[in-house]
Image: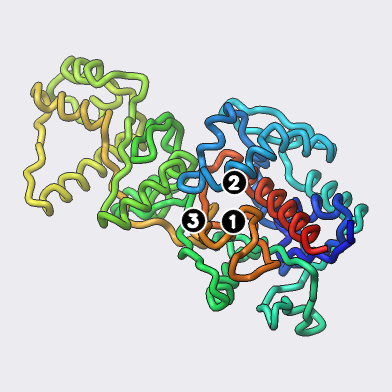
Amino acid sequence: MVRKAVLIIGGGPAGLMAAEVLAAAGHRVTVCEAMPSFGRKFLLAGKSGLNITHSEPYDRFRLRFGAANARLASALDRFTPDDVRAWALELGTETFIGSSGRVFPTAMKASPLLRAWLKRLQAEGVVLLPRHRFLRFDKGVPIFATPEGEMPRAADAVLLALGGASWPRLGSDAAWVDGLRNKGVAVADFRPANCGFDVAWPERFRERFEGAPVKAVRALSAAGESQGEFVISRHGIEGSLVYAHAAALRDQLASDGRAALLLDLAPGRSERQIEDALLRQPPKTSLSNRLRKAAGLDGVKIALFSECRAMTRLASSDAGAVSPRPSDGSAASAADVARLVKSLPLPVLRPRPIEEAISSAGGISWDGIDANYMLEAMPGVFAAGEMLDWEAPTGGYLLTACFATGRAAAKGIHGWLESRA
């Protein structure tokens, strides 16, 4: 094998994983990172416990990537969640499966794993260059802004692992998009994924409930049904349950101009049980007390019920429909209230800005990437990670796919270099 120089641009999970594979294959590997240190977004993801992968059956896991399922299948097959856990163990990080099926390091931190990883890469001869911000290609050679000024770095092959457009302060700022488009690379516009949404909260509601968790809720959208919790934010809603439906809500807003997350505020009770319990309440009892006693709702859920019911009525009036205005105590009122408790529309206005999103959708089109992750418009230049047009829910799917595409691109680079030797 001829030992070749490979330049990796981007020191996140995809780039570092590619460096590991290429160094093991005997190549001279250099990783350039814009930030002062490597893996910053990786460290942020592990701030409250690094969710490294997921333990659900693999035949379900591999279908969590939407329209990119087929294109990611080969990479994921070659680096499955079990492989991720075995890789972490090799680096001295034991993992465990949480109650949700998510997989975490036993230490619940990302820093020990990252330190061990970087140490191993350097022991294998990988050169790590921080404060090297990629600027452009000049006659096929990458140019970087460095503390010493602009600097070219030629190589036999280049891997781009620059990330998507979320959390730009950590390095993923999508500044590369225009440059690649000018080279003939098709790039789909980035959109927020795993994000919160704006909601038209009245000021009184916002002041009282900002930061309050809404627990034990079932949610329904075009993405399906899931149960968990979310948080009332100053601007709207955020949290794991919202993120699970973010792509569906975002796409519905883009196509229809409006969208709502359907909430079941009392997953443990049927609509009929709630209706019967409401009818047993004294007619003069306030709606808030009836909801608390009959449906088991706490203060934030009761307030959320009232606000969403008001927003739904307003939307119905704007659409020319007459929405029901139940009066306390009647059978119709109990039925209407029970129905809304079990199926409450929470209208959302827009996704929060992409800078706040956990991840992004969009990126380099799969149509312009060959089976080895090489850009067809730029022979010898490969791409991996969140630069590519795919998205996934939270739960370890994002990291696993970044690892897997980094490895797949590295193997593609190795094969391409061998074919040219």
Which residue type does callout 3 highlight? Answer: Ala
Of callouts 3 and 2, the N-terminal one: 3
**Above or below, 284 relative to 47:** above
At label 1, which amino acid type do we have? Glu
In the rendered image of this protein, does residue 293 appear above or below residue 169? above
Residue type at mark 2 is Leu
Dot 3, crowdedness within 10 Å: few (<14), some or many (≥20)?
many
Left or right: residue 339 compared with residue 391? left
The front one of 204 and 217 is 217
Task: Give percent across and percent down for residue 319.
Answer: 11, 52
Q: At numbered mark 2, what does the secondary structure look like: helix, strand or loop?
A: helix
Residue occupied by mark 3: 361
Marks 2/1 in contact by CB < 8 Å: the verdict is yes
Q: Residue at x 26, y 30 (%)?
A: 341
Find the distance from the CA under tag 2 to the CA under tag 1: 8 Å
The quadrant the C terminus occupies is bottom right
Q: Position of residue 351 (x, y in %)?
A: 40, 56
Q: Quickly name the residue at label 1.
A: 386
The percent coordinates of residue 381 (x first, y second) are: 68, 66
Residue at image point 65% right, 61% down: 374
How has the structure been colored for display? rainbow
Contact (CB < 8 A) between labels 3 and 2? no
Q: Is residue 6 left or right of residue 294?
A: right
At x 55% / y 30%, what residue is drawn? 59
Q: Position of residue 346 (x, y in %)?
A: 29, 43
Between disc 3 and disc 1, whose residue precedes?
3
Q: Identify residue for label 2.
A: 398
Secondary structure category for the residue under label 1: helix
Q: Nearer the viewer, residue 2 or 142?
A: 2
Tell me the distance, in whole angstroms, between the alpha carbons under discs 3 and 1. Answer: 8 Å
